[in-house]
Amino acid sequence: MNCILQCLLVGRRLLGLLACLCLVPSLWAEGGALSSAFKDHCTKCHGEKGKVKGKVNLLELKDDSALLANPDLIHDLIEVLDQQDMPPEEEPTLEPALRSRMISELKDLLQRALSGGSYAHTPVRRMNRFQYNNAVQDLFELTPVVFTLPERMLREYGYFKPETGRMPNQVKAGSRPLGKSQLIEKRLAGVAPFPQDLRAEHGYDNRGDHLSLSPLLMESFLQLSRSIVESDDFNPKTCGIWNRFFREPEAVSGKEIRDRLRPFLTRAFRRPVDVDTLDRYVGHAMARLEDGTGFIDVMKEVASAALASPKFLYLYDEAGQETSVPVDDFDLASRLSFFLWGSIPDETLLKIAAKGRLTEPAVLSNQVDRMLNDPRLKRFCDSFPSQWLELERIIASVPDPQMNPEFYFAKYRVSMHMMLEPLLVFETILVENRPILELVDSKFSYRSELLKEWYRSGGQSRRIPPTAIPFERVEIKDRREGGVITTAAVMTMTSNPIRTQPITRGAWMASVIFNDPPKPPPADVPPLPEKGKVDENLTLRERLDQHRSRPDCAGCHAQIDPLGFALENYGPTGIWRDQYSNGREVDVSGRLFRKHSFSNVIEFKDAILAEKDRFAAAFSSHLLSFALGRELDAADRPAVERIVAETADDDFPIKDVIRQVVLSEPFLYKTAPKRQVAHAE
């Protein structure tokens, strides 16, 4: 394939590189590395003699102002050069010294482009359903949950004790989405949850651009708040603040109500309540008391009003300015608590914030340690890892019953057990502060008896009821297992009912493990023909070679297919195989990032670990995006690089990575235009 066609195939990143190479005339004049690369590799396809491939005419670009105004483009350039995605394999390679000089010059340009700039603004957003449940539970110190959350995929039965720094060798766990018995828990009667908030594509369910609040939904939140305080299960036995907030005093007065409301509203609104707001709540309470309404009912009314207030429902930074400025202590307390606990700050955080000390690095670091050792950290485990791994896919996985009869037992599926394995591995790495590299290749896992038998016997299972299931910590001696990548859960959810899907698996690897999601395929690409319509003697690789002959498909496939075929020894339900059903050998060989050749999955894992900084940067980016509730851009990239550098010496212990996320500039700074306040008050 010639250079012109290959340039078209590589997509946005390559086009970005081509554009940028001609936007630096000052470097050309000085004989910079970018000028020689531009002349030797780009203009013959993008400008010379009227050729405009990919709708990019490099010779029309006159100066470097457009480049400096587009730091995301510069960052993409650095990545494609650093990761050796450029130039195309069919073209002459760049000499290492020239590539290094180009990267250095582009990094200088990126620094210039970002100087004096700001971080992206996280839009005003409401709490998602998960956060709302936690916040209400914490505000009232409720013993039951507000409503059941099926999105909590892993239900624990007393094993999660992060303060010990050790996960037990045997735990009891359950899976909410796939077993009705797992939905049985103490909750407020008569309280119905609002619809589940969906995960953003290549993101999370706390993204500001996905969490709007319509007038209709606002009315629903008011009704929801009333149903909470009026529930029969909302009483002195279940509500921890009942005596100090709801119980009628010996003498009712405006001062008494004010003294009760001030700490309650401060906790609900996550910063000291202003005088005007407090006066409105006290005035309403006094008016209702004068009308003859009972004290407890009045306090329930004002509590309900607080739950429906935008000050409670909305997550937003206090107004700042168009450029980034440090967050104040109360904004930081909220960022920290919603990141690690999925809820409002506790009294400890608010008291430290009130003293103006939370923004002190040492104090902040100590609070991160405290929060990572608190049982409420389970909420982070209930939210981040399942979304990062995209495990919601397994709920819809339905392997063909005739081909996989043992996948189904009674009306429940083996996938209920499969799903818990990577989540328990993640929790163990977090609780024990193990290196994040063990997410790729670990020497342990957690498995139920059914799951052990599934792996051991090649897809056989016993009929085990979907109650609290014992999972045992097992030693992994075969590196074909271990970590989260090669678990049966991931293999099953990236297959269709009758066969594996290397492209889907490759896209999952690119998105989840390397945080580099491929572009969606063209809409008119036909599906791969299935049985009865293909030569049954072909391997899946050979069938896909024929299928992806379209020029506009080959570029992306060259990037994602090696990632997917590396896992082809794992069948549609995660069972190891050396041959296809037609007797042909499974071929998993490939090259990772055009640098690391592999012939089996162990060598593939070694290749990933050889690129450990790249994996660490991808994982850190996922964490930072989750923590900020927004998509990252080029301005965040230097912070990601610092997170990796600060944690590299010990192979990136996960708590250290989380701590560095909190201490990063994007987490500690905000861009909060004044105009947003009108939406939040």
Image (cartoon, rainbow, N blue to C red):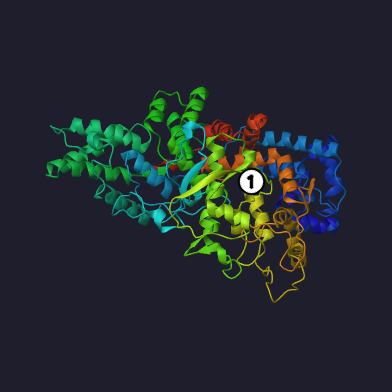
Type of amino acid at the residue the image marks with label 1: Gly
Q: Nearer the viewer, residue 77 or 575?
A: 575
For residue 597, side relative to residue 276 (left or right): right
Q: Nearer the viewer, residue 466 or 439?
A: 466
Name the residue: 83% across, 45% down: 38
Rendering quarter of residue 642: top right
For residue 597, side relative to residue 309 (left or right): right
* Percent coordinates x, y for residue 621 in the rendering: 60, 41
For residue 620, side relative to residue 247 (left or right): right
Q: Can the viewer see residue 81 in this picture? A: yes
Image: 528 above or below 350: below
* Percent coordinates x, y for residue 102 in the rendering: 79, 38
Rendering quarter of residue 558: bottom right
Neighbours of disc 1 within 10 Å: few (<14), some (14-19), many (20+): many
Image: 622 above or below 400: above
Quadrant for the C terminus, please: top left
Q: Nearer the viewer, residue 633 or 563?
A: 563
Count how many numbered circles sit on residues in the image. 1
Q: Can the viewer see residue 22 in this picture? A: no
Q: Of all residues shown, which one is farthest toward the bottom? A: 532
Say what secondary structure mark 1 lies in: loop
* Percent coordinates x, y for residue 201 in the rendering: 56, 54
* Percent coordinates x, y for residue 587 in the rendering: 77, 58
Name the residue that disc number 1 marks. 482
Quadrant for the N terminus, please: bottom right
Q: Nearer the viewer, residue 87 or 279?
A: 87
